Amino acid sequence: MTAFIARRLVLLPIVVIGTTLLIFALTQLLSPAMRASLFVQDPNQMRDLEAIIRKYGLDRPFYVQYWEWLKNVVRGDLGYSFVARQTVAEAIRSFFPTTLELSLFSFGLLLMVGIWLGTLSAVHKDRWIDHLSRTVSIVGTGLPTFVWGLVLLLLFYGMHPWFPPGRLSLEAYLYVTSDRFRSYTGLLTLDALLNGQLWIFWDALRHLVLPVLTLSYFTAAVLVRVMRSAMLETLRQDYVRTARAKGLPEPVVIRRHARRNALIPVITLASLILAGLLTGAVITETIYDLPGIGRWGAQAAQQLDIPGVAGFALFSAVLVVLGNLAADILYAFVDPRIRY
Amino acid sequence: MNEAPTVPQVLPKLRISRLTPERSGVGEFLRRLRRNPLSVTGLAIIVFFVMVAVLAPVLAPPPRGWRDPYKIPNESFAPDPRPPRPGHPFGTTSEQYDLYYGVVWGTRTAFRVSLTVIAISVAVGLVIGGFAGYRGGGADEVFMRVTDVFLAFPGLILAVVIVAVLGKGLDKVLIALSLVSWPTYARLLRGEILSVRQRDFVEAARALGASDVRIFVRHVLPNTIYPVLIYGSLDMASVVISAAALSFLGLGAEVGYADWGQLINLARPWIIGAPGNAFQYWYTLVYPGLAISLFVLGWNLLGDAFRDIMDPKLRGQA
């Protein structure tokens, strides 16, 4: 296992450098003047474009430019995003908690629903509950996030104004931005509890309901299908038959013997789930007007804010690479048959 | 169901299977497809969309002298959507683009986008993945790392970057989505080639003195291409969703282009309706939303059928 993890750790920096190279190669399609914004930390610097172009060698061969740019990236200087009106590093710091909070809630919900419904479906194969869960999941894999999100918005904000868009109501927003409220994590629900302000907690939670439902449906639907087929596979195994023959009660057989083993292939979905949450966040945050990195990335792309787009994409790629590494290590840890 | 079949039960089956000729090919494929009502539904949906796409000029004829049929005709630029009425069976969006026309011609756009992206990805994957898999060694290692890099990005996010750099537009969306999806095809093909390369018939061809190119084209490729094509059919749905998502974000087709994602983007500002009547503008979302959801559903159902039929491990299992 050590060798397997060591190989992954050696490959990790290669892939990360590769992602920077890919992003950099894409920016090479732009003119030097447009690329200059990748190097500034302050819009005022843009007044003297010539100086920036000369300083960072933007008119020199690409490897010189890449080196200059990479030095900046390593230092955390990813340029100035005019959409966010701050540097890219600051923008990520201020927008990421919103996305993280949204993703964490969605992740929890989709894991619970996916595993529960997938198990239920397999145990009651070809009964009405199985048909119901398969229908729900087939609809979920077909319904594009932006259609589903708009439907939810129409029903639960347009028709019944229960769950408004945005991150907080105005009242709560004013309180949160005042100095009576201390921000610990940036996750509003958690901060509200730490500040002992239960009403802000409920307000933030109310604003999370629709985005979380929007973001988790597709991935939960995929998870239900994988979980169902993995359960069907393990339920046929000899050790499950042995457990039944021993006279163990059926719920114990399902929980302890079948489901535990069926969860192993689910770990391989981690990469898909993570990528799905990040991609979904772009759409979901745009629909519900949540100030997260996804909405920022989409706006940056619309308004040709190249440092914003590049920073957002690099950040997402690093998240996915780290997530995959964690999943691989977990997989090798959980399943002793994996020893590359 | 779980007890093992007894010998007399097995024997007649064995005899039958030896007497009847091996079933394979298109006939068997269709026979399996017919057995599952969901696959038939999927097939029916796709056939329906193919017909809509083919018959678009008949179903929604563009006005006389109209240059580009993909540009939706509009009579005025009035900002508020208007409900279905004679002449506009699905209503009109803001700026009065006819929804019926947009949905019908949008079907063509959906097919054009998905088929183009998949064709480009298969072609690129074929060349690069084929080379890496057949050669192996250092070339293969480099290839794997390059695809690792592409696959590190969530697909849509990399596509967003590419479109941002290239500029907006449907043609840029095609380039972006092809760039994003070729590594999956290349890897799939490489894997297939790695397993076929070792087989006896390749060895035999080599022993007969066939050249590398000839072995690859005549012996390796025909035995590896089918999984790639199956995957391509599974991919139709996700390509259409990604393209529509880019249009929805305002990065794809321009306003007024017959594209489902773009129509849904036009519906967005009106989605919560008017005070007291949440459903006032329902048609702006329902028609294009239904079109794309059904299209994706059809491909997903069909894709499931392909997978079940092609994967012997899953055969007989629901």
Image (spheres, helix red, strand yellow):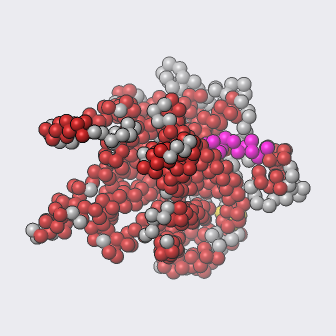
Look at the magenta stretch and give its main secondary structure: helix
Which residue: 50% across, 35% down? A124
Q: Where, quadrant-wise, is the C terminus of chain A in this rendering? A: bottom left
Between A264 and B193, the residue placed more toward the observer is A264
Provide the residue span drawn in magenta: A202-221
Q: Position of residue B101 (x, y in %)?
A: 45, 31
Q: Is residue B272 magenta?
A: no
Q: Is residue A330 visible?
A: yes
User: Hey, which residue is sitting farthest front in the picture?
Assistant: A246
Which residue: 38% across, 27% down? B59
User: Hey, which residue is sitting farthest top in the picture?
Assistant: B86
Q: Could you tell whether A15 is left or right of A76 in the image?
A: left
Total labels drawn: 0
Residue B81: quadrant of the picture = top right
Between B166 and A91, the residue placed more toward the observer is A91
Between B6 and A322, the residue placed more toward the observer is B6
Between A267 and A205, the residue placed more toward the observer is A267
Q: Is residue B214 above or below residue A248?
A: below
Q: Could you tell whether B242 is left or right of B199 in the image?
A: right
Q: Position of residue A103 (x, y in %)?
A: 64, 52
Q: Is residue A231 visible?
A: no
Q: Is residue B211 above or below residue B273?
A: below
Q: Is residue B31 above or below residue A331?
A: above
Q: Position of residue A310 (x, y in %)?
A: 57, 64
Which residue: 45% across, 63% down? A337
Q: Could you tell whether A300 is left or right of A203 in the image?
A: left
Q: Is residue B182 above or below residue B1?
A: below
Q: Could you tell whether B93 is left or right of B114 in the image?
A: right
Residue A236: quadrant of the picture = top left
Q: Is residue A209 magenta?
A: yes
Q: Position of residue A197 (x, y in %)?
A: 86, 49
Which residue: 65% across, 31% down? A155
